[in-house]
Every structure is written in structure tokens, then in C-alpha cells.
Image (cartoon, rainbow, N blue to C red):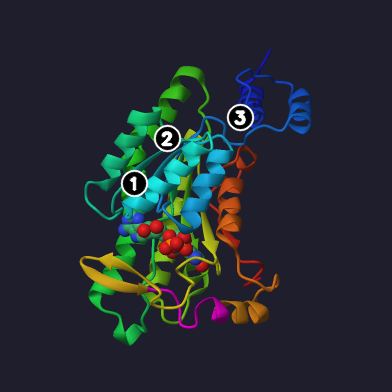
Amino acid sequence: MEGPQQRRVGVLLSHVTGSSQQSSQLGVLSENVASSPQLLLKGKVAIITGSGQGLGAAAAKLFAQQGARLMVTDLDAAKADQVAAEIRSQGGEAISLAGDVTAEDFPARCVKATVDAFGTIDILINNAGFTWDGMIHKITPKQWDAMLAVHCTAPFRLIQAAAPVMRDAAKKELDERGEATQRCIINVSSTSGTHGNAGQANYSTAKAGVVGLTKTVAREWGAFNIRCNAIAYGFIATRLTADKGSSTISVGGQQVKLGIPGGEAMASAAAEMLIPLKRIGTPEEAAGAMLLLASPYASFISGQTLEVTGGAYI
Ligand SMILES: NC(=O)c1ccc[n+]([C@@H]2O[C@H](COP(=O)([O-])OP(=O)(O)OC[C@H]3O[C@@H](n4cnc5c(N)ncnc54)[C@H](O)[C@@H]3O)[C@@H](O)[C@H]2O)c1
């Protein structure tokens, strides 16, 4: 007779193989995995915040290629629409939603739009964010609050808003069939959060905060088969590592300059000295780490902060 443990293995491997048929035969299914690779996220519904460009856009496209149905949401409506349209033009499924993750009504709007379109939420990635750098003695209250709002409060509120379709849905599944679908949350942190960074007291505090949130969600929702991990990225080539002021973001009507002094030339020089792989990462490589943690192969990984740095800080 099939026990709960064997049933769980069957469910897990059915995700990996894309087959709805469950089996308790680990060996047989392992063979299927090896002989017929399937889409890693087939049918999964994923929300990725800040997916109009950069890491989030790369992740949305990669997840769609792996069979996920995407909610592409961003402050920048045109960019979110463009990413979703590109996914659809390549045969994938995606919708877009414009919005500021820090807005009071955003979490409920985002969850509702996703559930209206796709029926559920399996994967939630809190990726939206930006930097607003300054030395400690110069950081304004607004600069400080903006970082905590976008990197800590917004992820917390979105996770809370998703609770009915993630936590409560899993609880119902457990009550009814003794096992819950694999679901996961990924919060995007930074090596500034895990190691600190001069000029980023506000950003590094917020990015450390999201690690605490991650571990707490992992502890509270683990019993519902919901994993929660953080990814602390090092240098990834996006507008946040481009030359300072080459792009801006509007925060409460104020234009905040993004980027770092010296831009990618400075980042590449730093990479030569500090990064074992001797280069900065690409958004596609950053997205790969998200896929790794969202995939069924990560089914026993929770509460971790994965540093994706090309080997820096080891
Ligand atoms: N690029 C790096 O080197 C690096 C390193 C560590 C961590 N990160 C983190 O990765 C995440 C993505 O950054 P990126 O490098 O792709 O930057 P990016 O600027 O290329 O993309 C971020 C996206 O988030 C959106 N966004 C920002 N604030 C928002 C808000 N309040 N509401 C909705 N959308 C908002 C922006 O419009 C943008 O499209 C951020 O959380 C960032 O802090 C980036």
C-alpha cells in the first residue's frame, strides 16, 4: 500500500515529469526524468514584481519558457505590457499589471488580477526594488523610508495578501487529501544586505530585513509545503549597476538617480579584483538562480539565502 511519504514523492516527481499520474515508484519516475526532460514549471502560476525590466523581466521570460503562467507587474506599465506581450508572442501565457508595490491597494489588486486570470498562485517573487544611495550622515528620512517600504513592507504585504490562495489553499488540500501542492516564495535580497555596503545604510538594512522575513515565512508556512528563500545578488548588469544618473525612478514625485559612480566599467574593475569568475553577472544568470529555487528539484530547500555573486564574498 502507498504511504504518505511515497505519495509525496509521487506528487513531487509528477511535477518534475509534468505527468498528472502519481507513482510511488521512485526508480521508475527517476528514469522518466532522465529520459524525457519536461518543463520545470509546467502550469505553475507565478507573480514576479518589478518584471518590466532587469532581473524580473529575464525571470518572467525564463519561467514562461519553462511552462509557467506569468503575472508581469511593474511600476512602468509600458515595460510590463511589453514583457507580457513578448511572452505571449512566443506561445507563453502572461498578463501584465501596472502598479507601485508600495501602494496601499497594490497587494489585493495584484492577487485578484492573478487569480481572476489563472485561478491560483504557486510562485511569488518579490523582486521590485531600486537603490537610493547616500552616506549615513546624509541619508534623509524619506530616503530611509523609501527603501524599507519597497524592500520590506511591500513584500510582507504581498505575501500576506496571497495567504488565502497560498497558505489557506494548501491547508485545505492537506485537510482533504493529506498533501499540498508545491508552492514557493522568493524574496530578492542583495549582498549589501548580507555583508553591508558603504553608501547603502538604507538599502542594506532593508535587504537584510527581507532575509528575516524569508526565514519567518519558511518557518510559518513550511507545514503547508510552501518554501521561502531569498537570493542575495552581487553585481548584475542592469540599470542599477549602470552609470549613476543614466536612469531615474520617480519616488513620490521626486526623480531619484539610479546606478553607481563609474557604472559597469567600475563594476568590471571591481569584478577583476573581487569576483572569482572575474566578471559581473547577467540578468539571465540571475533569473537562472530564481528558476533553480522555484523548480521542483529545490523541494527540500527552504529558509535559505542563496548568494549569487560569481563567487564573491566566499
Ligand atoms: N542589479 C544588481 O546588481 C542587483 C544586485 C542585488 C540585488 N538587486 C535587486 O534585484 C531587484 C531587481 O533589480 P534590477 O537590477 O533588475 O533593477 P531594474 O531597475 O532593472 O528593475 C527593477 C524593476 O522594478 C521596478 N520597480 C521599482 N520600484 C518599484 C515599485 N515601487 N513598484 C513596482 N515596481 C517597481 C522598476 O520599475 C524596474 O522595472 C531589486 O530588488 C534590486 O534591489 C539587484
Cα distance in 3D space between marks 2 and 1: 12 Å
What residue lies at 27% left-to-right and 47% top-to-bottom?
106
Queried whether the magenta region covers residue 181, the answer comes back as: no
Residues at discs 3 and 1 in contact (Cβ within 8 Å): no
Tell me which image quadrant ligand 1 sits in: bottom left
Q: Mark 3 points at which residue?
A: 15
Instruction: Point out the tag, 2 or 1, that comes first from the N-terminus.
Output: 2
The quadrant the N terminus occupies is top right
* Residue 183, position as x, y percentages in the image: 50, 36
Q: Give the amino acid at mark 1.
A: Leu
Q: Mark 1 points at which residue?
A: 158
The quadrant the C terminus occupies is bottom right
How crowded pointer 1 is (Cα within 10 Å; few <14, some 14-19, many 20+) is rated as many
Q: Which mark is residue 279?
A: none
Give the magenta-colored segment's residue range.
Answer: 258-266
Please tell me which residue lies in front, 29 or 288.
Answer: 288
Please tell me which residue lies in front, 259 or 228.
Answer: 259
Q: Residue 121 carries which label?
A: 2
* Residue 248, position as x, y percentages in the image: 34, 70
* Residue, far top: 1
Asked whether residue 152 appears in the rendered view, the answer is: no
Is 215 above or below relative to 246?
Answer: above
Residues at discs 2 and 3 in contact (Cβ within 8 Å): no
